[in-house]
Amino acid sequence: MLDPRSIGQQSANMSDLKLFNSLTRKLEVFQPVHPGEARVYSCGPTVYNYPHIGNMRAYVFADVLGRTLSFKGYKLTHVINITDVGHLTDDADSGEDKLEKAAAERAQSIWDIARHYTEAYWADVKALNIREPAKWSVATDYIDEMIEFAKGIADKHCYELDSGLYFDVSTVADYGRLARAVTEEGEARIDAVAGKRNAADFAIWRKTPPDEKRQMEWDSPWGRGAPGWHLECSVMGGKLLGFPFDIHTGGIDHREIHHPNEIAQNQAHCCTDGLDVAENSGARIWMHNNFLVERSGKMSKSSGEFLRLQLLIDKGYHPLAYRMMCLQAHYRSELEFSWEGLQAALTRLKRMVMAVENIPLDAPSDAPEENYAWIDRAISQDLNTPQLLSTFEFSIQSKQVAVGEKAEILRRVDPLLGLDLLNLTRADLRIRPKSATITEAEIEAALARRKEARATKDFATSDAIRDELSAKGVEVMDGDPLGWEWRL
Ligand code: AMP
Ligand code: ZN
């Protein structure tokens, strides 16, 4: 099999990889800081609750970016952090620490909560066929480094209040460039902390109030307390990937507060100036996926039906149908979740699996290289997965494309989209709700008996079996063009 990495970005035939940089609001040609390498940092989950499928969209996006960089021949180093301290109930400086709050409410240790939800997140990562990053960096493993980083910028960029150490955003050039305008609405979202010099100033270190005890607290030059949320990403990004690194990703909400604050810290730490030179922000390219939304509005973990991946699985959907749903939209477009949409994505995935069943995967191809250029062209255009999917689907189903060429397309595209088409079977994709009272083996046995009855033209028995199955919620689907023999 041809390793996509071996064709590499060195190949003269490959297109330039163009990515949308939120910092400049432009498509830019990817030029690695270190030749042949790509270093990517993705803001990871805050592990106080299960991720919802909107959160998982952010990691499917980061995964497609990583797969693209590998496809283009770069040696990828991807870091995703796990936030187990510091993230307040509001992204700015108000509210409580999300993990402290969850622990107090449930009378559990923070460490147990963090472990439980980290594992739940990893299960979703696996189910969605998201590749493991080179490193999962856990915030509480870097407290010493965070204190060192804060010490380094404290004199010139910070000031102390009773509640903690604050970053003065007026000490760096172009603060908030990433968010563009600090709108009045944006200003209003930032809670006033008594004594803050600028509304947008943010905590680097939060002191534990004298009458409080936190489960997670550490000694620092500014008293016992915990780091501010933005600090961890600056510290882990810089330490693990080196400033400047290539690409920083996150959901579009991070473009407003978290990433501007990270950038300000990076500027202070690197002693660099304004943001006209992209690498002064700590990373050359800042990329943001748009939101998955519900018809009723923003996706939330607290109101309405909590859309976890496990809920989709319990309702009988294969998790890769959700990955397909994500890939069908461009990552910068808002995507609305609906059950009908998920069903449509599942059907599309099934059609692809059926097409793949007819392709002998080791079939050699004598097609010229230019026949495959559309793959590179689509993905190089700011990760245009909807376009790539359409042409891919057409090609593997077309009678005009030779079987060897189809096999070669599949060998190249499957690792790029991560739909696992080389392993999925149509049986894997059958809808199987957790609530079903009949097992698949029982259904298959009943259908085998029915087939026998029909072969001997015993239609009374055949119909009786069909009715029995129907009473148990199984619809027998004779002659279904998609080849589902039954449906629960
Ligand atoms: P959190 O665990 O809240 O820190 O969020 C994890 C990631 O999910 C971040 O990159 C967020 O920007 C992203 N995110 C949050 N909500 C959504 C959503 N509805 N759709 C897509 N991404 C989201
Ligand atoms: Zn972050």
Image: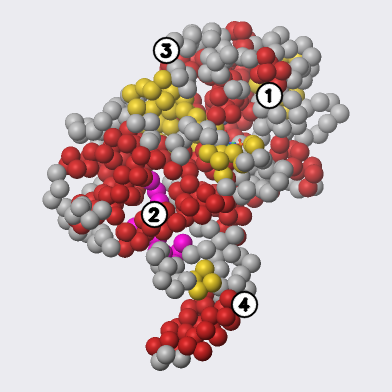
For label 4, count other residues whose C-alpha is less than 10 Å away and answer few (under 14), some (14-19) or many (20+).
few
The secondary structure type at the circle numbered 3 is: loop
Label 4: which residue?
Answer: 471
Q: Residue at x 53, y 80 (%)?
A: 466
Q: Position of residue 158 (x, y in %)?
A: 65, 12
Label 2: which residue?
Answer: 420
Q: Earlier in the sequence, mark 4 or mark 3?
A: 3
Q: Amino acid at mark 2?
A: Asp
Mark 3 vs mark 2, foreground winner is: 2
Q: Position of residue 270 (x, y in %)?
A: 49, 15
The image's mark for residue 92 is 1
Q: Earlier in the sequence, mark 3 or mark 1?
A: 1
For label 3, count other residues whose C-alpha is less than 10 Å away and answer few (under 14), some (14-19) or many (20+).
few
Mark 2 vs mark 1, foreground winner is: 2
For label 2, count other residues whose C-alpha is less than 10 Å away and answer few (under 14), some (14-19) or many (20+).
some
Colouring of the image: secondary structure
Q: CA distance from mark 4 to mark 3?
A: 68 Å
In the image, is residue 53 above or below residue 463? Answer: above
The secondary structure type at the circle numbered 2 is: loop
Mark 4 vs mark 1, foreground winner is: 4
Q: Position of residue 65 (x, y in %)?
A: 40, 36
Q: CA distance from mark 2 to mark 1?
A: 39 Å
Give the image quarter of residue 16. Answer: top left
Q: Quadrant of ligand 2?
A: top right
Q: Amino acid at mark 3?
A: Val
